[in-house]
Amino acid sequence: MNDESIIAICPRCGAKNRVPRSRWADRLKCGRCKEALDLRDLYPGKTIDVTDPVFQREVVDFKGPVVVDFTAPW
């Protein structure tokens, strides 16, 4: 994979879409279901809750820097 691209996961169908750096500001669509891909929505500049089922995708496989704050309910 080229360091100048990212993989955007479609929020509708879950398909992985490779997005080259030169297209990050474009109006993007999922290659499978044609849902709009807004990178600002897919990679928000705020905290998100990550559960066990999506930890691998959201944290381990993410190509950029990740800050993790682990908490427990007790």
Image (spheres, grey):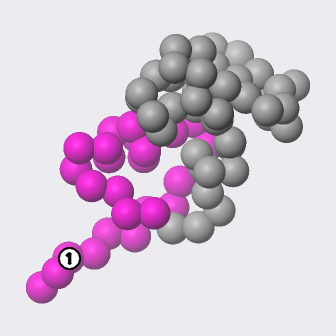
Residue 63, compared with residue 23, is above or below; it is below
Q: In what quadrant of the picture does the C terminus appear? A: bottom left
Please report the residue visible at 51 percent of the width from the left and 20 percent of the height from the top: 33
Taking the magenta stretch, the answer to whether it contains residue 62 is: yes
User: Residue 3's x, y, as percent?
Assistant: 71, 24
At 35% from the left and 57% from the top, the residue drawn is 50
Q: Is residue 66 visible?
A: yes
Extreme residue in the left direction: 74
- The three-letter code of the residue at mark 1 reads Ala
Residue 49: x %, y % from top left:
37, 63
Q: Nearer the viewer, residue 56 or 23?
A: 23
For disc 1, the neighbor class at 10 Å (few under 14, some 14 to 19, many from 20) is few
The answer to whether residue 41 is left or right of residue 11 is right
Q: Position of residue 53 (x, y in %)?
A: 23, 44
| 1 or 48: nearer the viewer | 48
Location of residue 46 (image quadrant) = bottom right
Residue stretch in magenta: 48-74
* Vertical position of residue 7 compared to residue 50: above or below: above
Residue at 62% across, 51% down: 41
- Pointer 1 residue: 72
**In screen coordinates, is 16 left or right of 43?**
left
In the structure shown, which secondary structural element does the residue marked by tag 1 occupy? Answer: loop
Say which residue appears at 83% left-offset and 26% top-offset.
23
Position of residue 44 relative to residue 71, above or below, is: above
- The extreme bottom residue here reads 74
